[in-house]
């Protein structure tokens, strides 16, 4: 019976990932809906606003990127590169996040989807009071 059970789980997993692939295979949706991509692939770890889940919230990260890059294209490109292969060297938003949460695992998405979701993340930095001097980022104290 154990075998049957695990086969059932595998079949269900394949079913779900097949469905996700079918959804993300639609280029128009992938190009435009960064928010939907975020909800499906990132929100399990990232909240948008504090308090954090198992990763730093998106809005302060986005503000940090906007402080470091003047153009959205540059910020998005850097974020995409980080998501494909996160590393300590590439961390830009919050160097202490790694010791607090661990390094982010690589994201398995197409370039179009990565660009869409990074563009959405960038846009989250536009609103809210996370401007320079708000204490977010490298100098944030750990409890
Ligand atoms: C399994 C959990 C997990 C998932 C899923 C995840 N992240 Fe992360 N992410 C983390 C953690 C932990 C950190 C902080 C440590 C680090 O920077 O590696 C992080 C950091 C980041 C950063 C900051 C990088 C920097 O320069 O400091 C960005 C941007 C980011 N994530 C975006 C995303 C996006 C967009 C997705 C979805 C496509 C995503 N993450 C999915 C866990 C996750």
Image (cartoon, helix red, strand yellow):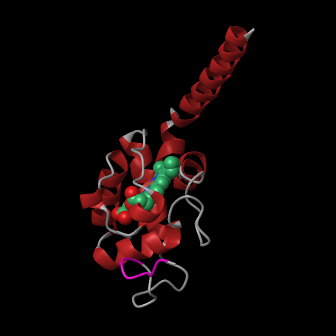
Q: Is residue 70 visible?
A: no
Q: Tell me: 76 left or right of 130.
A: left
Give the vertical position of 127 relative to 18 (above or below): below
Q: Quadrant of residue 75?
A: bottom left
> Which residue occupies 32% across, 67% down?
92
Question: Where is ligand 1, by quadrant?
Answer: bottom left
Indicate yes or no whether the magenta region holds residue 141. yes
Q: Quadrant of residue 138?
A: bottom left
Q: Is residue 127 visible?
A: yes
Give the vertical position of 141 relative to 88 (above or below): below
Indicate the position of residue 25 as horizontal and vertical percent values.
51, 32
Q: Residue furthest bottom?
A: 133
Q: Residue furthest right?
A: 1
Give the vertical position of 91 relative to 26 (above or below): below
Q: Quadrant of residue 74?
A: bottom left
Q: Residue furthest front?
A: 143
Indicate the position of residue 109 as horizontal and vertical percent values.
43, 40
> Which residue occupies 50% across, 66% down?
56
> Which residue occupies 39% across, 51% down?
115
- Residue closest to the eye, 67 or 134: 134
Secondary structure of the magenta portion, mostly?
A: loop
Indicate the position of residue 22 as horizontal and vertical percent values.
57, 28
Quadrant in which the N terminus appears: top right
> Which residue occupies 51% across, 60% down?
55
Give the magenta part as a residue range: 137-142
Indicate yes or no whether the magenta region holds residue 73. no
């Amino acid at each position: 019976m154990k075998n049957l059970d695990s086969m059932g789980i595998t079949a269900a997993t394949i079913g779900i990932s097949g469905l996700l692939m079918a959804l993300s295979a639609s280029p128009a949706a992938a190009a435009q809906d960064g928010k939907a991509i975020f909800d499906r692939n990132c929100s399990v770890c990232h909240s948008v606003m504090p308090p954090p889940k198992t990763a730093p919230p998106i809005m302060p990260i986005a503000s940090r990127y906007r402080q470091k890059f003047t153009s959205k294209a540059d910020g998005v490109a850097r974020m995409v590169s980080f998501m494909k292969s996160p590393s300590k060297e590439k961390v830009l938003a919050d160097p202490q996040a790694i010791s607090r949460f661990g390094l982010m695992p690589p994201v398995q998405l197409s370039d179009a989807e990565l660009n869409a979701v990074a563009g959405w993340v960038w846009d989250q930095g536009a609103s809210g009071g996370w401007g320079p001097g708000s204490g977010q980022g490298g100098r944030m104290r750990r409890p």
